[in-house]
């Protein structure tokens, strides 16, 4: 196995830190890479993994942690591991290994630990954003929907029952706790449930047209990648017009990509305002659009995400472009 492949495996094994079970794999690969008698990784919490015979190096480790400098005794060398200029642990190498190689190994491990923390922070931020988005169910909408359903209980029991099922599907989708991805079909079921409730509340003020090509329905996307866009079109497009308005949702395949558009004929906004929204300079309602854009780009890459087409008085069209297939993105 070449050094590059070994380096990638070491970095992957250290993604979750020195205390993770995978760290043992990193020590084995480091030992092979350095051709050392033994290699140990010691965390600040006392967690340690060894490959080869465990070396009695407690005194050296204590010395390194106290001085933040290299310590050696005989053919055993200990070097500090640092992340963002803060102590992260100690690398111990035993055997006839050149000091320069040991230093490079310590730098590499420190860098791998740093990248692992960044990735973990990014994952945590993404999950926090999704939790925040799921928590943004409008109490005003819920109240209006339940009040409307109650009004149908005596006059049209069948309609009331259908709307209750739509309400249950809408809430269940928003509060789902399993998995990160759903299919486009699953997301559209929640969108249709929301639109059914919105039509019941707004009556003839809301006109809806949905056109989705069957071939894109199995495409996997992050949860709540489309519903916030449709809610935004209804709440900040249609509801802001005295006579109501229309919302159009379309989805089709374009080569290797899937393109979805959510369009309303509401008041629109300036192109500068739209640019501010996707640059994170927006507030309030625009945070939902920003959240979706960030999550799509984090999952699929910078070439994907949202495009907002709008102008004052000309309505708003939000275009979503995602790949039809993407490694690691699987609906559950």
Image: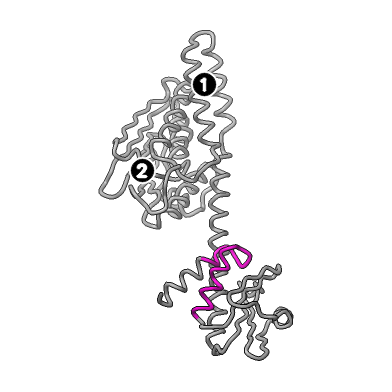
Q: Residue at x 37, y 34 (%)?
A: 265
Looking at the image, residue 67 sits to the left or right of residue 306; the answer is: right
Q: Residue at x 61, y 72 (%)?
A: 83
Q: Residue furthest top?
A: 155
Which tag is nearer the camera, tag 2 or tag 1? 2
Q: Secondary structure at mark 2?
A: loop
CA neighbours of label 2 inside 10 A, class few (<14), some (14 to 19), many (20+) = many
Q: Position of residue 307 (x, y in %)?
A: 38, 48
Along the viewing direction, whichever of 220 and 73 lies nearer the viewer: 73
Q: Residue at x 62, y 89 (%)?
A: 75
| Magenta part of the chain | 13-33
Q: Which residue is label 1 attached to? A: 164
Q: Quadrant of the C terminus?
A: top left
Q: Position of residue 61 (x, y in %)?
A: 70, 79
Instruction: Report, in whole angstroms, how far the alpha carbon at label 2 lies from the one at label 1.
Output: 28 Å
Q: Position of residue 237 (x, y in %)?
A: 44, 34
Q: Residue 56 in magenta?
A: no
Name the image quarter holding residue 213.
top left
Mark earlier in primary sequence (2, 1): 1
Along the viewing direction, whichever of 207 and 31 lies nearer the viewer: 31
Q: Are marks 2 and 1 in contact (CB under 8 Å)?
A: no
Up-down: is 172 above or below 60?
above
Residue 219 is tagged as 2
Q: Residue 32 in magenta?
A: yes
Q: Residue at x 62, y 78 (%)?
A: 53
Residue 156 is tagged as none
Looking at the image, residue 206 sits to the left or right of residue 103; the answer is: left
């Amino acid at each position: 196995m070449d050094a590059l492949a070994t380096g990638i495996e070491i970095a992957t094994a250290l993604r979750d830190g020195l205390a993770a079970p995978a760290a043992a794999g990193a020590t084995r690969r480091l030992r092979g890479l350095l051709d050392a008698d033994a290699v140990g990784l010691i965390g600040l919490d006392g967690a340690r993994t060894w490959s080869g015979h465990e070396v009695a190096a407690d005194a050296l480790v204590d010395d390194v942690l106290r001085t933040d400098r290299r310590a050696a005794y005989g053919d055993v060398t200990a070097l500090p591991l640092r992340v963002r200029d803060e102590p992260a642990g100690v690398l111990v190498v035993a055997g006839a290994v050149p000091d320069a190689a040991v230093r490079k190994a310590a730098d590499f491990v420190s860098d791998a630990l740093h990248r692992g923390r960044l990735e973990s922070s990014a994952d945590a931020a993404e999950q926090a954003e999704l939790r925040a988005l799921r928590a943004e169910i409008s109490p005003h909408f819920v109240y209006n929907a339940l009040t409307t359903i109650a009004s149908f209980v005596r006059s049209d029991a069948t309609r009331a029952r259908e709307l209750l099922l739509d309400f249950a599907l809408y809430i269940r989708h928003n509060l789902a706790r399993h998995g990160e991805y759903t299919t486009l079909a699953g997301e559209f079921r929640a969108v249709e449930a929301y639109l059914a409730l919105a039509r019941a509340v707004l009556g003839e003020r809301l006109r809806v047209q949905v056109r989705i090509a069957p071939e894109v329905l199995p495409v996997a996307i992050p949860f709540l990648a489309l519903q916030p866009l449709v809610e935004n079109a209804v709440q900040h497009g249609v509801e802001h017009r005295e006579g109501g308005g229309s919302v159009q949702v379309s989805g089709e395949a374009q080569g290797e990509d899937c393109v979805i558009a959510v369009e309303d004929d509401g008041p629109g906004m300036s192109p500068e305002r739209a640019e501010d929204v996707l640059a994170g300079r927006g507030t309030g309602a625009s945070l939902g659009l920003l959240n979706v854009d960030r999550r799509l780009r984090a999952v699929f890459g910078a070439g994907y995400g949202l495009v907002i087409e709008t102008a004052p008085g000309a309505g708003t069209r939000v275009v979503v472009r995602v790949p039809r297939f993407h490694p690691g993105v699987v609906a559950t």
